[in-house]
């Protein structure tokens, strides 16, 4: 795959996470967007240094961390500013939190995939934009309370599944 096409594919996937990472340190939205733009520009210029098959996100996080540190140095005149050490700590914690969020999302996707078709369909219908339990009930010919009970059981099952997939103990409210 051509390097710039690979960049586009990876950037579309990771840009929201990189922006969230930047926002953990850069307080002002406009500044965070500037930092994100700088990160994208650097990654684009250096895409030939990226080896396909390695972790694009880790490379992008390292670049973002350096751009954020440079941004903090330039922003010394601002009243609110984190020290370089705090910036590094927040950046490191954000990478860790991002990895946890990705693991949780992957576990949830896997667990939803394990649901019977009828339950997956009910979840899909309920989380369509603008959907309500009432609209799902009308579309499926069930009562609103039956839809509510079924969704509650599905949510508990998904919660149990996600906790188990992550190797964590299942909370009591998910066992009922």
Image (cartoon, rainbow, N blue to C red):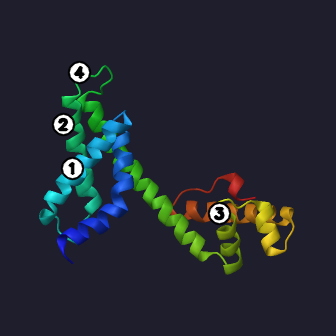
SS at mark 2 in the image = helix
**In this figure, which residue is indicated by the disc labeled 1?**
63
Q: Quadrant of the N terminus?
A: bottom left
Q: Residue at x 26, y 56 (%)?
A: 58
Q: Quadrant of the C terminus?
A: bottom right
**Residue 100 placement: quadrant:** bottom left
Q: Marks 1 and 2, how far apart in space?
A: 11 Å
**In this figure, which residue is indicated by the disc labeled 3?**
127
* Disc number for residue 77: 4
Q: Residue at x 19, y 30 (%)?
A: 73
**In this figure, which residue is indicated by the disc labeled 2?**
70
Q: Residue at x 62, y 57 (%)?
A: 170
Tell me if mark 2 has few (under 14), some (14-19) or many (20+) residues whose alpha carbon lies within 10 angstroms of its own.
few
Q: Are marks 4 and 1 in contact (CB under 8 Å)?
A: no
| 73 over 158 or under it: above or below | above
Nearer the observer, 90 or 137: 137
């Amino acid at each position: 795959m051509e390097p710039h096409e690979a960049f586009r594919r990876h950037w579309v996937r990771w840009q929201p996470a990189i922006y969230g990472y930047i926002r953990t340190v850069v307080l002002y939205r406009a500044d965070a967007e500037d930092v994100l733009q700088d990160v994208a520009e650097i990654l684009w210029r250096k895409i030939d240094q990226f080896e396909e098959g390695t972790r694009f996100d880790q490379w992008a996080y390292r670049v973002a961390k350096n751009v954020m540190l440079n941004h903090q140095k330039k922003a010394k005149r601002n009243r609110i500013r984190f020290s370089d050490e705090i910036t590094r700590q927040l950046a490191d914690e954000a990478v860790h939190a991002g990895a946890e969020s990705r693991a949780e999302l992957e576990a949830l996707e896997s667990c939803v995939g394990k649901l019977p078709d009828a339950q997956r369909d009910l979840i899909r219908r309920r989380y369509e934009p603008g959907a309500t339990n009432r609209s799902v009930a009308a579309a499926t010919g069930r009562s609103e309370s039956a839809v509510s009970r079924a969704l509650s059981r599905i949510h508990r099952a998904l919660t149990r599944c996600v906790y188990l997939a992550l190797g964590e103990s299942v909370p009591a409210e998910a066992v009922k």
